[in-house]
Image (tube, rainbow, N blue to C red):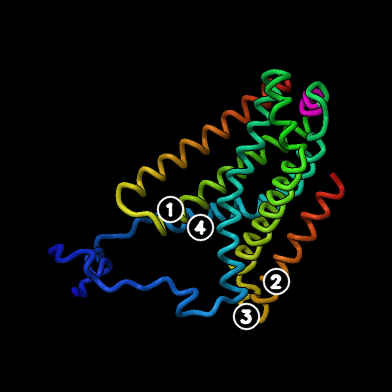
Amino acid sequence: MNYLTDRKRAEGLGSGRKGTHHHWKMMVTSISLVVLVPLFVFVFGSALGRSQEEVMAFLSRPFPLIVIAMGLIVGLTHIKMEIDEAVEDYVHGIARKLTLVATAALVYTLMVAGLFALLKLAL
Amino acid sequence: MADVNRGNRPLSPFMIGPYYRPQITSISSIMVRLTGIASLGSAFLVVWWLLAAATSESAFGLIDGLLRSWFGDLILLLASWAIWYHMLGRLRHVIWDFGYGLSLETSEKMGWGMFIAATGLALFTAIVL
């Protein structure tokens, strides 16, 4: 056993400086989601169950469209931070880096695909 | 400083279970993380449904039929529970960050409250929609 710790090795080299920003973004999205989650759940819930034409008409209206778009942007941003945090806790080495890249790719693909779909539905 | 014997150091074990009794504070916290990650799956379904609605009638029919079947209802019920629970869990973090509700008793109450309120909200969502 060797008791030289990572902390001892890292001391004096400066921090990553990202922790405070991450925490603040988490707080901002968390507070935003207290408003957005109820709106999103009820707007999506009332869109579901309609025919395709009715869905198009419903999501062309400004309020439902903005709620769904905001929900996707803020929600997925929050989910990405949530997953990144868990990955940084439990996955190590190259696997960690690749998982972080894969998460970012998936999250942003979903976000763009969702926004594109809304755009197409509304226009 | 030399990089000696990296990885050959004692590490802290996973505590819950063998060394640490599961408590509502730890379980409710773990559930916040799990529901947050699981919501990516819900987001996937929502985006699939939106994209299908914007694409064609047959594409829409497939995912819409899936979400409106009994299995879809079950998935959506669980998804809504998860998103409500996560919202409440993150709200609890914000309350803590502002310096309130940090006593053990209040934390435990909030933990139970999250489970109960999320279940209530999910059932309310299922009944109303």
To the question of a shared chain for discs 2 and 3, the answer is yes
| Residue linked to disc 4 | A23
Whole-Å distance between the Cαs marked 3 and 4?
22 Å
Taking the image as shown, residue A81 lies to the left or right of residue B92, namely: left
Whole-Å distance between the Cαs marked 4 and 2?
25 Å
Mark 4 or 2, closer to the camera: 2
A70 is within the stretch colored magenta:
no
| Residue linked to disc 2 | B112
| Residue linked to disc 3 | B103
Q: Which kind of residue does numbered mark 4 sit on? A: His
Instruction: Chain letter for mark 2, please.
Output: B
| Residue linked to disc 1 | A87
Q: Which kind of residue does numbered mark 3 sit on? A: Ser
Instruction: Chain letter for mark 4, please.
Output: A
Q: Quadrant of the C terminus of chain A?
A: top right
Taking the image as shown, residue B42 lies to the left or right of residue A51, namely: left
* Mark nearer the N terminus (4 vs 1): 4
Whole-Å distance between the Cαs marked 4 and 1?
16 Å
To the question of a shared chain for discs 4 and 1, the answer is yes
Identify the residue shown where x is 62% and y is 54%. A30
Mark 3 or 4, closer to the camera: 3
**Residue situated furthest front in the rendering:** B70
Q: Which kind of residue does numbered mark 2 sit on? A: Trp
Instruction: Chain letter for mark 3, please.
Output: B
Chain part drawn in magenta: A55-60
Mark 3 or 1, closer to the camera: 1
Compare residues B79 and B33 and report the one nearer the observer.
B79
To the question of a shared chain for discs 3 and 1, the answer is no
Q: In the rendering, at what x and y percent does residue B34 appear?
A: 57, 57
